[in-house]
Image: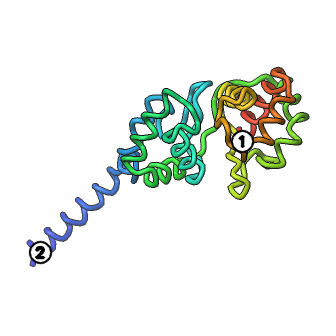
Amino acid sequence: MRALVIAVVLTAALGASGAAAAGPTDTPGFTKAFSCSACHGRAGASRADAVPVLAGMPAWYFKKAIADYAAGRRPSPEMEPFSKMVGTLSVDEIAAYFAAQPRESSPVGVDRAAVAGGRAASTQCATCHGEDGRGDQAKGSPPLAGQPPGYLLNQMKLFKAEKRSPGDENLTKMKTLMRSIDDTTLAALAAYYSSLGR
């Protein structure tokens, strides 16, 4: 009887220690998403100005971006091979992994005057991206809040120059809007949306 009790206690202790030892690398999807951390940071929490934050990104948008990169609809020599790798590994699992990570806004600093100017200029953007910059799946609009300002500015300039998602008729209205905005105001918009959620 004593041996049985000891065996039960040891089994319970080992099970508890195994659960206690579980960490970030045990999270479903971590292993498949790990290579993304080289550019996008630990668990998708990018610290770089030009690289987007993936932590907390809605799975629907992650999957759309990966599909667009892989098909060449969103030209990027850097991202095309990685997007194909993500598709092979399981885009659903990797998208779910990043969506489950705590949302971390970019740590890149922004100028307060630029933020104020961007807030004033954001009225038309809010129609699709929301007042809080959290995006709208029904409109296909991704969240902008907390993304690095350099990344946001670069994407707006790519839209303006018809270099991002060229020929996509769903983006015609937005690209027309981008062309009507000068680069100084685009930078202010980038600062404003980056500042949201901090």
Image quadrant in which you'd find residue 85: top left
Q: Residue at x 72, y 45 (%)?
A: 169
Tell me residue 39's x, y (percent): 48, 29
Residue at the outermost right position: 120
Q: Secondary structure at mark 2?
A: helix
Amino acid type at image mark 2:
Leu
Closest to the observer, 65 or 32: 65
**Above or below, comparing residue 192 to residue 142 in the picture:** above
Q: Residues within 10 Å of mark 2 (few under 14, many from 20)?
A: few
Tell me residue 23's x, y (percent): 38, 47
Rendered image: mark on residue 170:
none
Amino acid type at image mark 1:
Gly
Observer-side mark, 1 or 2, equals 1
Relative side of 14 to 185, left or right: left
Closest to the observer, 183 or 8: 183
Quadrant where the C terminus is found in the figure = top right
Q: Which residue is mark 1?
A: 197
Relative side of 29 to 64, left or right: left
Q: Which residue is mark 2?
A: 4
Q: Residue at x 37, y 45 (%)?
A: 32
